[in-house]
Image: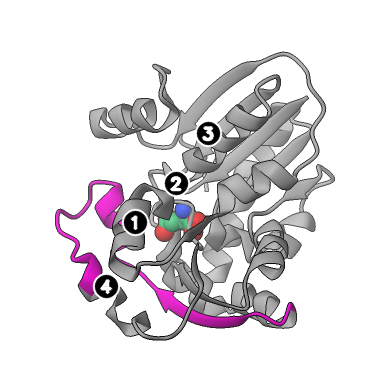
Amino acid sequence: MRIGVFDSGIGGLNVLKELLHRHPNLEYLYYGDTFYLPYGEKSREELIKLGVRIIRFFEEAHVDRIVIACGTCSSLIEEYKKYTEVPIDDVICPTVEYTKKHYHKVALLATSATIENGTFEKKLKQAKIEVEPLSCPNFVPYLEGLSEHLNMDEELKSIYHKDCEAVILGCTHYPLLKNEIEKSLSLPTIDMGKVLSEAIKLEDSKPMLHIYMSKVTPFLQRNVNKILERDILVIEKNLPV
Ligand code: DGL
């Protein structure tokens, strides 16, 4: 079984890592749209346009299933489904299901696009979970090497003393800041990649892994090896918009 996994950059590797751990005997194609990141500041129309060309790339590679390893694009799963027959999974639905089983009130940290779009928050509220949403637009540029400083306590201070029981890392980049977030808020975090990889049902096949990004730098290559804990050459492939 061949799975296409995509995100704006290295964030989705946190999802891929969990999938590789839970379902090692599969063929994975990863696409990180590093040329166009951050996705979290893009409009709905731009995100649909960018996502659909990745879906086409995966279709041409004959994937059997697509995993949207991006919180921002996961809000738009219903839109993407209109463009393909390939089954698509997102990270929001399994996260809501998981949260419902364990918590009553959570903080939701995500990109500006995810928070403004409101789909994630709405789904949590429909599941009777109280939510304190917070957009964190400085996290992704910091993690992708586009900015140098991040003051975590300052970023999160608006959700201090809100009686949350846990924090949803609502953007797949954020597990890379898990320790800092847990320390600042003294709360456990919910990792969408872990939740998805436990919830998804996949058939075994031949293990194989290919990583594509629309822009590759030495910083990015080092990060990929570090996150996946293996040496794998990232192939630069910029898809026309
Ligand atoms: N990792 C993505 C998400 O889960 C997108 C981050 C970005 O490019 O802004 O939302």
Give the residue type at disc 4. Answer: Glu
**Residue of label 2:** 11
Earlier sequence position, callout 2 versus callout 3: 2
Q: Residue at x 34, y 31 (%)?
A: 216
Give the residue type at disc 3. Answer: Lys
Query: Is label 2 in contact with label 4 (beta carbons under 8 Å)?
Result: no
Q: Is residue 150 left or right of residue 173?
A: left
Q: Is residue 41 left or right of residue 3?
A: left
Give the residue type at disc 2. Answer: Gly
Q: Quadrant of residue 22?
A: top right
**Residue of label 4:** 155
Location of residue 133 with respect to 37 vertically, above or below: below
Q: Which mark lies nearer to you, 4 or 1?
A: 4
Q: Is mark 1 within 8 Å of ligand 1?
A: yes
What is the distance, in whole Å, between disc 4 and disc 1 at their CAs? 13 Å
The secondary element bearing badge 2 is classed as helix
Earlier sequence position, callout 1 versus callout 2: 2
Q: Is mark 2 within 8 Å of ligand 1?
A: yes
What is the distance, in whole Å, between disc 1 and disc 2 at their CAs? 8 Å
Q: Which mark lies nearer to you, 2 or 3?
A: 3
What is the distance, in whole Å, between disc 3 and disc 4 at their CAs? 27 Å
Stretch in magenta: 127-153
Give the residue type at disc 1. Answer: Val
What is the distance, in whole Å, between disc 2 and disc 3 at their CAs? 10 Å
What is the distance, in whole Å, between disc 1 and disc 3 at their CAs? 18 Å
Q: Is residue 147 left or right of residue 140?
A: left
